[in-house]
Amino acid sequence: MRLAKLLTSTHHQQLEKTMTSKYKLYGNATDDFLFELVCKYNPSSLGHLLVQDSVLYNEIRQRKTLRARLSDARGWRRVVQDWESFQASDWIKLFEQFKSARELHDDYGAAYRAADNLGVWSEIKKSMVDSGKWSDQLYGMDGRRYDSRSELIVANWLHYSKIDYISHPKLQLKETSKPFRGDFKLPAVANIEVFMFPKDEVKHRADLPDWSDDYLITRQKKESHYQEEGLPFIAIEAEIYRQHGYKRYLAHIREQFANLYLPLCDPANFPIEYSQHQLGVKWGFEDFIDYAQANNINSISQFISDAQDLHKLIKIKGLAKEVRVKLDQLNNRRSIAYNKELRPIEDVRADCLRLGIIERSEYEHAHKKGLFPIDTPYSILQSYRVSWFEFINGRKIDDFWAWENAKQFVRSWGFKSKTEFAKHPKKGGDWDFIRKSPAAPSGGYPEWTSWPDFLGNVSHEEQQANKDKDESNNKLIVEFGSLDTAAAVTYLKKLGLENTSKLKEMTRLYAHLRNRPDWIKLRDMLAVRIPKVKTTLEAIEILIMEKCFYFSDFIAQRDSNPNLQRIPKHPDRLGKGIFELVRKTVGLPAHDVKIRSSLR
């Protein structure tokens, strides 16, 4: 809160804690306190104070003694003028000291009242507006004046959309002798009202103007009038523009107009937010350049910081590229190509071929020398999102030939072994279309069989053997597709593939298993070594726990039971007669193999 920073004394801090509203704080404060506060704001005029703190401004205007004291101390008091002797040139010279009619009215009320009483106010004000010296006057593109920026936006949007409308139509309210005026009327379509704030805003805002109560009464009367007369009515809330900005306000207007099916134009292509006499609205290319030179603006980006409204107008008018290039030329600077203005990549590639450019370094050197048009980028990768290889060759670096075409090409070279193939240089020409590691599980050919088959030096018997091996692998792949993780690990161990090193020898099966979502878990389980029992007693405990009392049961269950896998396939290695001891321990006949335990 800016006020808290300004109050430094203990008395001021206590006031801030006890008073939650600025109105109460300033209303109960002394003239000395307000005088000190204004000095800390350090405004150049009373109108400037309005921008800094409107509540404080309104409080000071009600205290004539304090206002006179500030005028004397701050140098705000003006000399008495002989207004009747003023000519038109004198009025214009005086008015030029103020940015707008509102500023003149607030800072120099005596001059405003004198011009109004003498009947020259309307003429002089129109002259200031037409000349562009009062650029903040809200005159729409239709030439009519509007009371707020939010109302101006609606008028301009209707104007550029070429929709017929009437500004400020008269409303015959029954309880008033003088007619109220609405905001807009679309003949035979609907009435439009741009309300400054909604009814419930009174509960949330502490900075409402003095006329807010009367305004809410007027709003209620208008709404009742439209309802009683049965007139179609659209309510647009200007508070959205104040709180959320221009784009959100446009979305709100479009939403309200949705049911009317009116063809609204694209606001990005028109100065919807601008007043008719605002600086730059009627300018062309040369006017923007002249303004830039007169105000030491050396680049298009400097417009953003020094003259943001003009920068928006430059974009709306479609002059951004022309202004940027011209300013670069005036300041001896090479223009940079923006993404929206880039040349087609095919044209840039054609220029490179014409100039004999193959390497990226050659392209960058030619770009620095200015051999390409302005809208040619320096970095191909950053601007077009393609690698240099893809740009200069017209294809991706991993755009390889299919398996049969690649195999046919490699066989034409007559390689005798894998080593001979690996030593051969494979860069440039058709070799760019051959995978560098054809047998690799990742990055190789999915159809890979063997090196002799790939190189073409394999016998008919070997080819048949490889074919049978492929069919066997296909069957295994289908079988593993229906197994869960534990079952797959058990099956792999049964096949003798007890670790990933052995599994990698079966290339296609290994590649298939790596694509499983549970591959990490499967690999870890395959790598786990189950600790073996070392004594007969440990083996007997496991057999009793798993209810395995006969050797035939042990053999049938061992492959699927990790606990039984701790016991050797031939338990007699730990000691003879283990199963007889197990049956004796649980009370089963030790030698009658036909009896099965009822405990199972």
Image (cartoon, helix red, strand yellow):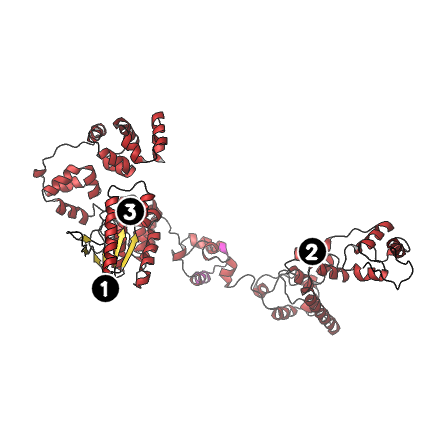
Precedes in sequence: disc 1 or disc 3: 1
Q: Any mark on residue 523, and which?
A: 2
Which sits in the foreground, 280 or 323? Answer: 280
Q: Any mark on residue 557, and which?
A: none
Which sits in the foreground, 295 or 270? Answer: 270
Position of 366 with respect to 396 (left or right) is left
Reading the image, the residue beneath label 1 is 188
Reading the image, the residue beneath label 3 is 292
Provide the secondary structure element on which disc 1 rests. loop
Quarter-of-image position of residue 400: bottom right
Main SS of residues in magenta: helix
Distance between mark 1 and mark 3 Cα atoms: 47 Å
Position of 491 with respect to 190 (left or right) is right
Precedes in sequence: disc 3 or disc 2: 3
Farthest-out residue, left: 85
Amino acid type assigned to the residue bearing label 3 in the image: Ala
